[in-house]
Image: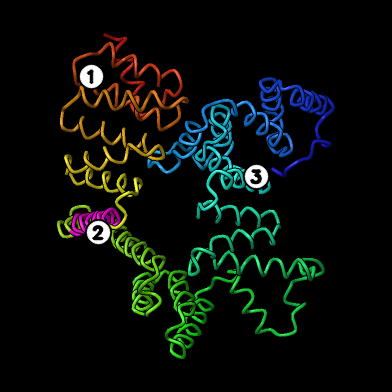
């Protein structure tokens, strides 16, 4: 849906917008929010109204405890994020709006709003959501990348360049940011030359070779032949200037684009062997991510082979071996990160989750207990503690953790549903069906399709 202006709304809605502005001036924020909600239900693509609503939400939220508000906004780093099906962006949009009505600083909800807006062809709305996230967390790399993509979709190439530059100032070899900058540069050049009108932009370039190079740098052409050409050119540059990490980066990107992950990993390691690469944490992270991708690719291929030969013992053992190898690698990387950055609560949360998955419950508990002190990952850590205690059949301790996590979440989103469900399961295991069914009812009344709550409710009333 194309974004619309207030002047394109029908007369009734325009009058409602006027009332919203008066309400904002008079400090009647509740009315302003409700009126904007009515308008957006009819015309969700009206960005000006969405901006008015956010202004009212933030003013209403202003009187609340700012530390609590910031902590709620930071919950986006938890691994149990709520999300609607990407096949239904309208539903995703509704869930984001519902969450933002409770907490306008929710990074999770703002990101979901951006995702939904891009899926609904509302790039300016997506950019607005990403800009709001940037106000909360200016250095969030993933958000800056999404912001750049939204700017490009909205034909704001200069802004996209600035978003890419914000990443590259601290991550000079970030491949995704470099790619965003190249595409934004090309888009800006095309806009200045008005190349998008009066025929293809190739006709406006004197040199056909320049056209090919420009298209490829912007990823307009992604054929195997062109990708190989990029790889060959990068290989030649690396041979001439082996210490230039920009050439290594281009080469690694080419291999990744071609799906040749093993070679991308090999050249990443060669880049890290260079004096500058050996001390660059970005290249270290890049190597770790690529190693995970390589293992995931091998596991995916093995699972496909097992699907074609379900009775094959060899194929089954191969899958199990690769699963163990992938988990072992992730666990090792997580342990290394905690050793290097012992005060990083997010790293401890990740390590705790992996330790739980490998059955090392006491070690996982130790990590979650330290991670819960940080408000950004507290909910995830409490949930992790609850799952550990539940697995150890220490149900009373698990109930305490899940209850604490439940109390800190205002909205029954996907995260809270999962926590409430686990709480109900603990009560079930403790032989307290009345307490269990009370938790399941809370979910059932909002989402009948969540896991097996419908079956549990039906079975309870059948008894």
Cα separation, mark 2 vs mark 1, equals 36 Å
Q: Earlier in the sequence, mark 2 or mark 1?
A: 2
SS of the residue at dot 2? Answer: helix
Relative to 9, 237 lies left or right:
left
Q: Earlier in the sequence, mark 1 or mark 3?
A: 3
Cα separation, mark 1 vs mark 3, equals 45 Å
Is residue 337 highlighted in magenta? yes
Q: Which mark is residue 329?
A: 2
Where's residue 191, x and y in %?
Answer: 76, 66
**282 or 318, which is in the foreground?**
282
Relative to 420, 109 lies left or right:
right
Relative to 151, 319 lies left or right:
left
Pair 2/1: label in front: 2
State the residue position of label 3: 128
Tag 2–tag 3 contact (CB < 8 Å): no
- Taking the spot 48% from the left edge, 65% from the top edge, the residue there is 171
Q: Which mark is residue 428?
A: 1
Residues drawn in magenta: 318-339
């Amino acid at each position: 849906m194309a974004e619309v202006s207030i002047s394109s709304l029908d007369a009734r809605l325009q009058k409602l917008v006027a009332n919203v502005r008066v309400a904002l001036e008079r400090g009647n924020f509740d009315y302003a929010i409700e009126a904007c909600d009515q308008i957006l239900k009819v015309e969700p693509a009206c960005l000006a109204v969405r901006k008015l609503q956010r202004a009212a939400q933030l003013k209403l939220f202003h009187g609340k405890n700012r530390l609590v508000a910031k902590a709620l906004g930071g919950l986006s780093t938890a691994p149990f994020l709520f999300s609607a099906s990407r096949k239904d962006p309208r539903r995703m949009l509704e869930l984001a709006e519902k969450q933002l009505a409770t907490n306008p600083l929710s990074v999770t909800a703002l990101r979901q709003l951006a995702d939904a807006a891009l899926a609904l062809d509302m790039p300016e709305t997506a950019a607005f959501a990403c800009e709001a996230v940037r106000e909360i967390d200016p250095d969030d790399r993933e958000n800056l990348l999404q912001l750049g993509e939204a700017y490009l979709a909205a034909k704001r190439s200069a802004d996209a360049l600035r978003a890419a530059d914000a990443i590259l100032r601290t991550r000079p070899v970030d491949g995704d940011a470099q790619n965003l900058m190249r595409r934004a540069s090309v888009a800006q050049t095309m806009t200045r030359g008005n190349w998008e009108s009066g025929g293809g932009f190739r006709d406006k370039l004197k040199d056909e070779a320049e056209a090919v190079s420009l298209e490829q740098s912007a990823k307009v052409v992604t054929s195997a032949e062109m990708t190989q050409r990029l790889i060959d050119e990068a290989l030649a540059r690396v041979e001439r200037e082996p210490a230039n990490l920009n050439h290594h980066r281009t080469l690694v990107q080419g291999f990744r684009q071609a799906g040749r992950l093993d070679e991308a990993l090999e050249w990443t390691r060669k880049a890290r062997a260079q004096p500058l690469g050996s001390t660059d944490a970005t290249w270290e992270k890049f190597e770790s991510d690529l190693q995970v991708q390589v293992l995931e690719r091998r596991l995916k291929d093995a699972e496909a082979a097992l699907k074609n030969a379900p009775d094959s013992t060899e194929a089954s053992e191969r899958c199990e071996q690769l699963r163990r190898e992938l988990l072992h690698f992730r666990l090792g990387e997580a342990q290394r990160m905690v050793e290097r950055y012992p005060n990083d609560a997010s790293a401890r949360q990740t390590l705790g989750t992996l330790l739980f998955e490998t059955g090392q419950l006491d070690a996982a508990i130790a990590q979650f207990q330290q991670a819960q002190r940080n408000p950004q990952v507290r909910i995830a850590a409490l949930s992790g503690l609850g799952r550990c205690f539940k697995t150890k059949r220490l149900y009373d301790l698990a109930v305490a953790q899940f209850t604490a996590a439940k109390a800190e979440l205002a909205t029954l989103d996907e995260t809270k549903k999962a926590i409430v469900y686990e709480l109900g399961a603990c009560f079930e295991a403790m032989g307290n069906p009345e307490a269990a069914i009370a938790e399941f009812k809370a979910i059932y009344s909002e989402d009948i399709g969540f896991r097996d709550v419908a079956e549990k409710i039906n079975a309870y009333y059948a008894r």
